[in-house]
Amino acid sequence: MPPTRFSPTITRLSRATLALYLVILAIATFTPKQEKTRQAVWEANRHLKVESKALPQGIFHKVLYSDGSEVWVGNLLLLIPIVILLTVAFQSLKYWQIFLLGSCSSAFIEFIQRFVPGRVSDIRDFGTNCLGVLLATLCVAFAKKLRAKSS
């Protein structure tokens, strides 16, 4: 059975999306960690008479600046888009190559974070990133087999 191919338009779109995701990922992971806490922001802006509930704290902020289980889940999910986009954007890549690129991305992130103020490079982060890449690669391989069977 011939391999599943995506249209040239989908391939170009996925390559552009991959580039955009990599830029966003770089900004999110290489930006120095904010030292101000929610309380410090409230104290600095109390003259505005804004209730503390009005200070937004989105999911990305919680994941990037947390020390709890959110970090583990965030690291597990962080590189899944890279796996999916690489699969569509570069259809000739083998699964082991996709896993290797995802794992190298994680290693690069952890290496650079050693030099970014307020960031910590952790082998556990690398491990959970690689686990996420592995699970995503296995899911993509399974989905491709299902798609090929249904064709």
Image (spheres, rainbow, N blue to C red):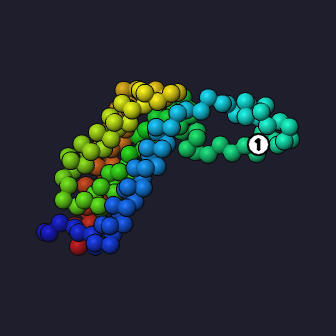
Nearest the eye: 141 or 38:
38
Question: Which residue does the image show at 30% across and 55% down from the upper left?
Answer: 86
Residue 41 in sight here: yes
**Number of callouts:** 1
Residue 124 position (above or below residue 8):
above
Disc 1 crowd rating (10 Å Cα; few below 14, some 14-19, many 20+) is few
Q: Which residue is mark 1?
A: 53
For the residue marked with disc 1, what is the amino acid?
A: Lys
Residue 6 position (above or below residue 52):
below
Question: Which residue does the image show at 65% across and 43% down from the upper left?
Answer: 57
Residue 28 position (above or below residue 1):
above
Question: Which residue does the image show at 51% across and 37% down from the upper left?
Answer: 31
Expressed as whole percent of the image width and height from the top left, the position of residue 105 reads 33, 41
120 sits to left or right of 85: right
Question: Which residue does the image show at 37% across and 56% down from the upper left?
Answer: 18
Residue 70 in sight here: no
Residue 94 position (above or below residue 28):
below
Nearest the eye: 142 or 100:
100
Q: Quadrant of the image for the C terminus? A: bottom left
Q: Quadrant of the image for the N terminus? A: bottom left
Expressed as whole percent of the image width and height from the top left, the position of residue 71 reads 49, 35
30 sits to left or right of 41: left
Expressed as whole percent of the image width and height from the top left, the position of residue 141 reads 25, 55
Expressed as whole percent of the image width and height from the top left, the position of residue 146 reads 26, 63
Nearest the eye: 131 or 21:
21
Per the image, label 1 sits on a secondary structure element best described as helix
42 sits to left or right of 148: right
